[in-house]
Image: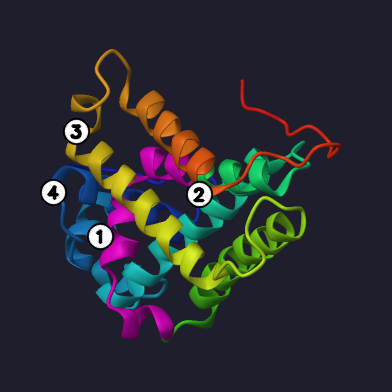
Amino acid sequence: MSVTPQPGQHLLSAAIATASQIVSETGKLPRLKVIAKALGVEKEQLKTVIFDRDHLLVVMADVALQRLLHTITQQMAGCSSPVDQLEKIAFAYIDWAHLYPQEFRLIEEMPRAVFEAHPRLLQYERSVHYLILKLMQLAREEGYLDPDEDLIMLRAMSHTYLFGVITKIMLGVLTRWTPGSSDHEAARTALRAFSRKLFKPERAGSPPRLRSV
């Protein structure tokens, strides 16, 4: 495989794109010499922007998490209810994992010590965790959850469910349980069902929730 950076494309971004392509083909993080060969550059030149394979993993995770945050922001636009905003975050996570499955796998499989050694990655993760917790607090205040609901555990349960749905999509088995729909449609249906079980109906007299179309 020979990949040449496009005019104006930085070596780092070209290397990340190439590494992502190789991971999608092989399922493994490539060595720097493989990326350098694909780009048509010397390994030492590549090492000026990517120092080693651990650094490659980190920069790929950094770019992927930036994309996730951007997708979440887009999905949440126009939603007013905290419950609908939480649902949109889940949809954004599915859309992101569908578009960047290799990055999703790399991040989920990244050793915790490696992840936590990089403040930017922790900042991305914590910003999403904080947003979810804040929306759950608003949902509780508006009567969608019981006053004594354990929001930390609820957040963990929701992530576990979402991770399971995405994993089934990647294994190609989700539609076995929902015949007649695509994986993407089945995932959204599963998340809506989870949301209906998790949250109470809106209180009488409260503003109507925005529903997905």
Sequence-wise first label, 2 or 1:
2
Image disc number at residue 71: none
Q: Amino acid at mark 1?
A: Ala
**Of helix, strand and loop, which one carries label 2?**
loop
Q: Nearer the viewer, residue 98 or 90?
A: 90
What residue do we see at 19% from left, 33% from top? 172
Q: Earlier in the sequence, mark 1 or mark 3?
A: 1
Q: Which residue is mark 3?
A: 172
Q: Nearer the viewer, mark 3 or mark 2?
A: 3
**Residue hosting label 2:** 9
What's drawn in magenta, residue-wise?
93-116
Q: Secondary structure at mark 3?
A: loop
Residue carrying label 4:
26
Residue corresponding to mark 1:
36
Identity of the residue furthest to the left in this view:
26
Q: Earlier in the sequence, mark 3 or mark 4?
A: 4
